[in-house]
Image (cartoon, rainbow, N blue to C red):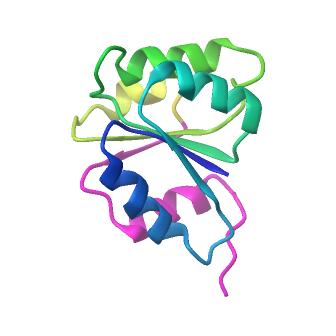
Amino acid sequence: VLLVIDDNEGIFVAFQGFVAGHGYKVVGTRNATDALRLARELHPAAITLDILMPSQDGWEILQALKAHPDTRAIPVIICSVLDDPNLARALGAAAYLQKPISQRDLLGALRALALPLNTG
């Protein structure tokens, strides 16, 4: 499972297409409460996380994920229009992708995390 946390539904659709045929099921959510619950319940292989979201920003969600024992080991890939990879890594993100994100970018980040990808 690839958990996609983003307020833009178009990102869910794009990422589903990007990982189709590569062994991932995309589960998406637009809010922090569901994101934290889904991360604990699904134990996804990775999480992509937007920063600019209503009600609770991605930095807060990242900190909550890294603070909880059930989710702290899940790799988080920040996907944002903001250009702040140093802060992302300082807060525990495994990777940083600046939007717009291509299929090559996302699959490359997953490979860099040593996550298995089906190639056929």
Above or below — where is 19 with respect to 59?
below
Q: Give residue 3's quadrant in the image.
A: top right
Q: Nearer the viewer, residue 29 or 74?
A: 29
Is residue 91 visible in the rendered image? The answer is: no
Residue 104 lies left or right of residue 1; in this view the side is: left
In the picture, measured across the screen, residue 71 lies left or right of residue 65, that is: right
| Image position, residue 85 (x, y; %) | 35, 35
Q: Is residue 27 visible?
A: yes
Residue 99: in magenta span: yes
Label count reads 0
Where does the C terminus fall, quadrant-wise? bottom right
Q: Residue at x 66, y 31 (%)?
A: 39
* Depth order, front residue of 68/39: 39
Residue at position x 41%, y 28% from top? Answer: 88
**Could you say where residue 69 lies in the image, as x and y percent from the top left?**
77, 16
Q: Is residue 80 above or below residue 64?
A: below
Q: Is residue 80 magenta?
A: no
Left or right, 97 with respect to 27, comes to left
What is the residue that sits farthest to the bottom in this orientation?
120
Q: Which residues are magenta?
A: 94-120
Q: Position of residue 59 (x, y in %)?
A: 40, 19
The one nearer the camera, 2 or 30, is 30
Q: Position of residue 35 (x, y in %)?
A: 55, 28
Residue 23 picture quarter: bottom right
- Residue 90 is left or right of residue 111, and the answer is left
Q: Residue at x 38, y 63 (%)?
A: 14
